[in-house]
Image (cartoon, helix red, strand yellow):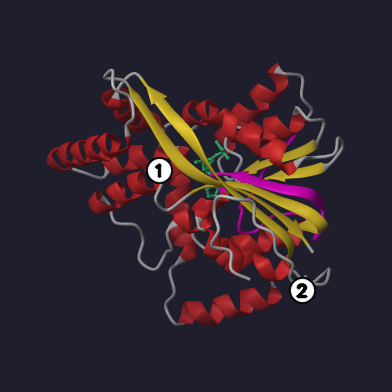
Amino acid sequence: MNMLNFNSPLRLLAGASRRTPQQPQSKETKMESSAQINSTPDYRAIKAKQNAAWSSGDYAKIGMTLQITGEELAEAANPIPGSAVLDVAAGNGNATLAFARRWCEVTSTDYVEALLDSGRMRAEAEGLNVAFQSADAENLPFENDAFDIVTSTFGVMFTPNQSRAASELKRVCRSGGKIAMANWTPDSFIGALFKTLGKSVPPPAGVQSPAQWGDANWIDATFAADAEDISINRKQFNFRYYSADHFIEFFRAWYGPVHKAFLALDSEGQQQLEEDIQNTIDRYNVATDGTMIVPSDYAEIIITQS
Ligand SMILES: C[S@@+](CC[C@H](N)C(=O)[O-])C[C@H]1O[C@@H](n2cnc3c(N)ncnc32)[C@H](O)[C@@H]1O
């Protein structure tokens, strides 16, 4: 079924082809080992580098500004109180807190412990009962069908082995459960920001763009075979800062991928990157008073598993 219509909720019916319990990923793992012999990307090395990037700066300072996206996603997922929810690549708890505020039993996971600690502090401050656990999104330490809802806001999209991560989301979500995601689209401001970073510090060879997770066709191709229903809404998050300079300074200090990109460059390269980011912001900025309001498109995706 054609999934190109991005602005209205999409519906599709597809035949069920879920894995049987006790056989997680075996087929895929075999395919990966033979693919690695044929020199596919070294996912382990790439992931270690990415982990170092997300561990640098302090993503929590950015994450708390995105809270509205977690709240809106949780509303769209329409959870029943008591639902078992897994937040994948949760950072400091954007979606985690939103689902916990709706009486869900949330397990919040990320591969950066310091971000889980930030999420834990936020949950404690609100008296929310959340389980925090370190986990790689590509190798989730949970049983098949363990969760009613599996969610990720701007998180799982950054895994290098995309098909593996998608399989893991499907595996741990029960039949009839939902996979709820917020993913930046390829033409969004954040999509453009990553392209800008890539000009100065090229991404690892062979790894697909994270923004594929915000593309309706890719979501269709990746999830439709195991889905009873897919709905995708295109939404916008406004990055609001005092000015473009403020944004650049803030992201350079705290947003791991930007922080690391600047560190990798000499002073000339840093100046060029700063200019490039400034130009990228100028292309999207709708503020007319010298401040910065940059709407960034994202796909709010609810997949109901067959
Ligand atoms: C842009 S942040 C989003 C965090 C949070 N979900 C939010 O909405 O604010 C990306 C997050 O993905 C996490 N991440 C990236 N790759 C991961 C992986 N393979 N396993 C677990 N977490 C991962 C990073 O540590 C980081 O917290």
**Residue holding disc 2:** 15
Drawn side of residue 180 relative to residue 264, left or right: right
The relative height of residue 120 versus residue 271 in the rendered view (above or below) is above
Q: In this orientation, does residue 159 appear? A: no
Residue designated by label 1: 190
* Span colored in magenta: 130-155
Q: Is residue 297 above or below residue 33?
A: above
**Residue 237 visible here:** yes
Magenta stretch: includes residue 217 = no
What amino acid type is highlighted by mark number 1?
Ile
Q: Position of residue 112 (x, y in %)?
A: 55, 41
- Indicate the position of residue 285 as horizontal and vertical percent values: 32, 32
> Which residue is at a point 16% across and 41% down the rendered structure image?
272
Q: In which quarter of the image is residue 244?
A: top left
- Res 21 → quadrant: bottom right
**Disc sitting over residue 113 in the figure:** none
Give how far across and how far down residue 289 sits, in percent: 28, 17
